[in-house]
Every structure is written in structure tokens, then in C-alpha cells.
Image: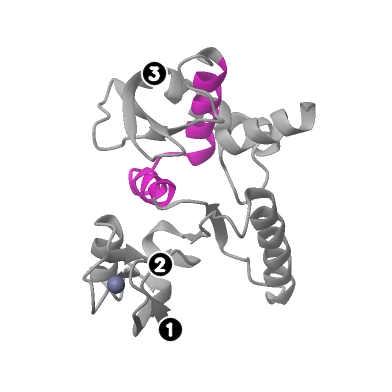
Amino acid sequence: MSISTTVNISCPSCGTSQDVRLYDAINVNTDPELKVALMQNQLNRVECIDCGLSFRVDKPVLYNDPALKTLIHWVPENDAAGREEILEEFEQSLEKMNAMMPEDQEAPAVCLVLSRVELVELIFMLEAGLNQRVVEYVKYSIYTRNSEKVNPKQHRLLLNVQDSTEEEFCFVVQNAATNELGELLRYGRAAYDSMSELFVENPDEFMDMFPGPCISARNLLLEEEAYEA
Ligand SMILES: [Zn+2]
């Protein structure tokens, strides 16, 4: 089941207010049209009844595709809530959720993403059966080896599953401030495959690197940088 609430929203351009239905949680199994809307950047998008402006209302959305066996929580990073604050709040609510679970039942896997592009990337990744921690490990090495081209402060590195091949992964560099997509980087699939084998043999190293719900090389690098400073 998907969950929505009706909210009164003012147009950021002309100020006209209207009641709109916004989604807090989407189940793409029962409501597949909401997945289409998300992919087309139409989810929680409002068109002003007066001036016609189309704008997206950024609010936390829980993405639930039972087939993925992972709940993905999209909590948009904005001026009011910074990255650290979101992560902290999220950890707290996860602890509460785990505490509420009956003892014989395992809590579902929950991931956190901070932007829509990261959400879409993760959906494709999980649908393709890829290991998110290994993919982020690959990104971590790309970031650290090409620090001039891809700097975590300015760029996001996104895996483009659709343009990846049997031989190569295709990553795209995105400008984190403007969201503009830039250069493509290719990475041999063989290296990913051997890292996936390492993961199966000894997942601890990967778990230590990405222990929390936010499995993100960029986030890890930004944290490391903040720690050093
Ligand atoms: Zn308007």
C-alpha cells in the first residue's frame, strides 16, 4: 500500500496556494504507476493552478518494492536539514524500529539515499542484482585515484546500469551543485566481479567501510575529509 497526505502548498513563484496529494511511501508492487512517476521525476510534482509552474515538493519518501527485499528511504538533503543531521535522525529512527520488532522476526534491510538520482541509481543497481557495497567500494577507488576529475565535494559518481555492458561498468560524473551530468568513466567488470568474490569470502571489510544505512562512497569521503579538518 502507498501512503499519501493532502497538503496545502503555495507556489514558489506566484504564491497561489492549493491542496495537493503528496506521497510519503510508495509500494511499487501495488501501485506500479508511482514507480513510473518517480522515474520520470513526476512524483510529488505540483503544477500551479494559477501560473502553471511545475515544481517538485521535496519530502521524505519510503520506496518499497517487495521484490528487492530492501526498503529505500529517500530523505532529500536541503537547506533546513544537512547531511549529518539527516544521518543522525535516521540512525535513531532505525534503532527505534529495530527495538519494536518482535524477537523472532528480522527487521527489513533499510537503505538511505539523499537525492532522487541516488534513489533511481540504487533501484537499478538492486534490480540488476548488484552488490551495493561492492559498487560503492569501486566508486571509492575511482574517487581516490582520479581526485582531479572527480572530487566528492563537487561531484557525484553515479553508476549507469542501463549503459553498462558485460565487460564494463559505465559511471557518470554529476555536478552535485547543478545536477548537470558530465563525463563518463568506464570500469572493468572483471575487477568488480573479483571484489564481489572477496565480499562473499570476507564481507567484514566492506561492512566496516559502509556500516550504516547510507551506503555511499561519496558520503564516506566527505566524512573523512570533515574529520581530518
Ligand atoms: Zn504559481
The image quarter in which residue 18 lies: bottom left
Q: Nearer the viewer, mark 3 or mark 2?
A: 2
Structural distance between the alpha carbons of marks 3 and 2: 41 Å
Where's residue 47, x and y in %? 25, 72
Q: Which mark is residue 190?
A: 3
Residue at horizontal 37 percent and vertical 75 percent from the top? 15
Where's residue 210, x and y in %? 64, 39
Say what secondary structure mark 2 lies in: loop
Q: Is residue 147 above or below residue 162?
A: above
Structural distance between the alpha carbons of marks 1 and 2: 11 Å
Disc nearer the start of the sequence (3/1): 1
Camera-nearest residue between 61 and 42: 42
Q: Main secondary structure of the magenta part?
A: helix
Say what secondary structure mark 3 lies in: helix
Residue at horizontal 34 percent and vertical 80 percent from the top? 16
Disc nearer the start of the sequence (3/2): 2
In the rendered structure, which amino acid carries the disc numbered 3? Ala
Structural distance between the alpha carbons of marks 3 and 1: 49 Å
* Disc 1 and disc 2 in contact, CB within 8 angstroms: yes
Q: Which mark is residue 57?
A: 2
Camera-nearest residue between 184 and 168: 184
Where's residue 114, x and y in %? 52, 51
Residue at horizontal 36 percent and vertical 72 percent from the top? 11
Disc nearer the start of the sequence (1/2): 1
Where's residue 85, x and y in %? 69, 55
Q: Is residue 4 above or below residue 43?
A: below
Provide the residue span drawn in magenta: 117-144
Say what secondary structure mark 1 lies in: strand
In the rendered structure, which amino acid carries the disc numbered 1? Val
On screen, residue 151 versus residue 49, left or right, reads right
Name the residue carrying label 1.
7
